[in-house]
Image (cartoon, rainbow, N blue to C red):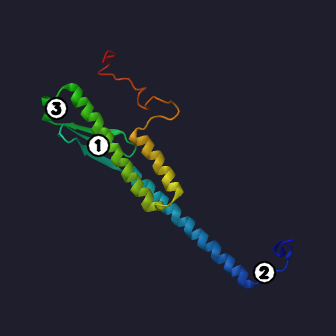
Amino acid sequence: MDDRVLNTAVPMPEDHDAARQRLAGWQARAEQLAADTQAMGERFEQLRVTKTDPAGMAEVVVDSGGVLVGLTLTREIERAAPSVVAATIMSTIQAAKSDLADRARVILDDTLGPESPVARAIADQVTERLRGRPDPRRPGVDADEDNETRVFGRDDV
């Protein structure tokens, strides 16, 4: 049987000191990780990405959740068909979300380290959500395909 289990001798004072130092080190690392995680959350909340399409028709702003919070259209839209303008806006939003995913990954890497399995898992989830990859639970159906187009309350568009 293992002598460590059977050993009932009182630990030497040095053992107590070493254990206290280890515990203090663990506590310090845990406190630092908590502070870093809080700072990471604050950086995420402040994230906003502004993106302009190559033709200069639209500028979009998305917040940290990938939600469109700003849209500016220029006179360039007057030279394009409405379907082109709509597609340009949508692709610019998607490009902004893609940039947002990249920035989120940088924040995660800065906080948890690029080799952290936790950082990779979170970054993968954020990337999947923001880049609009197909929903794996519904093969052949894009995650956004359920959203029907509605223009000013019209169903026929």
Q: Nearer the viewer, residue 124 or 8?
A: 124
Q: Quadrant of the C terminus?
A: top left
Instruction: Write down the quadrant of residue 66 in the picture.
Output: top left
User: Could you say where residue 142 lies in the image, as x and y percent from the top left?
Assistant: 43, 31
Name the residue located 60 percent from the left edge and 69 percent from the top edge: 26
**Contact (Cβ within 8 Å) of mark 3 with mark 1:** no
Q: Looking at the picture, does residue 154 appear above or below residue 39?
A: above
Residue positioned most to the front: 140
In three-dimensional space, the C-alpha distance between marks 2 and 3, rounded to whole angstroms, equals 79 Å
Tag in front: 2 or 3: 3
Q: Looking at the picture, does residue 109 appear above or below residue 134?
A: below
Tag in front: 3 or 1: 3
Residue 78 visible from this viewpoint: yes
Q: Which mark is residue 77?
A: 3
Q: Which amino acid type is marked by label 2? A: Pro
User: Could you say where residue 124 lies in the image, as x and y percent from the top left?
Assistant: 47, 48
Disc 1 crowd rating (10 Å Cα; few below 14, some 14-19, many 20+) is many
Disc 2 crowd rating (10 Å Cα; few below 14, some 14-19, many 20+) is few
User: Could you say where residue 46 lies in the image, as x and y percent from the top left?
Assistant: 36, 51
Q: Nearer the viewer, residue 101 or 45?
A: 101
In the structure shown, which secondary structural element does the residue marked by tag 2 occupy?
Answer: loop
In three-dimensional space, the C-alpha distance between marks 2 and 1, rounded to whole angstroms, equals 62 Å
Total marks placed = 3
Q: Is residue 97 left or right of residue 53?
A: right
Q: Which amino acid type is marked by label 1? A: Val
Q: Looking at the picture, does residue 87 appear above or below residue 111?
A: above
- Residue designated by label 2: 11
**Contact (Cβ within 8 Å) of mark 2 with mark 3:** no
User: Could you say where residue 76 lies in the image, as x and y percent from the top left?
Assistant: 14, 35
Precedes in sequence: disc 2 or disc 1: 2
Name the residue located 31 percent from the left edge and 42 percent from the top edge: 95
- Residue designated by label 1: 61
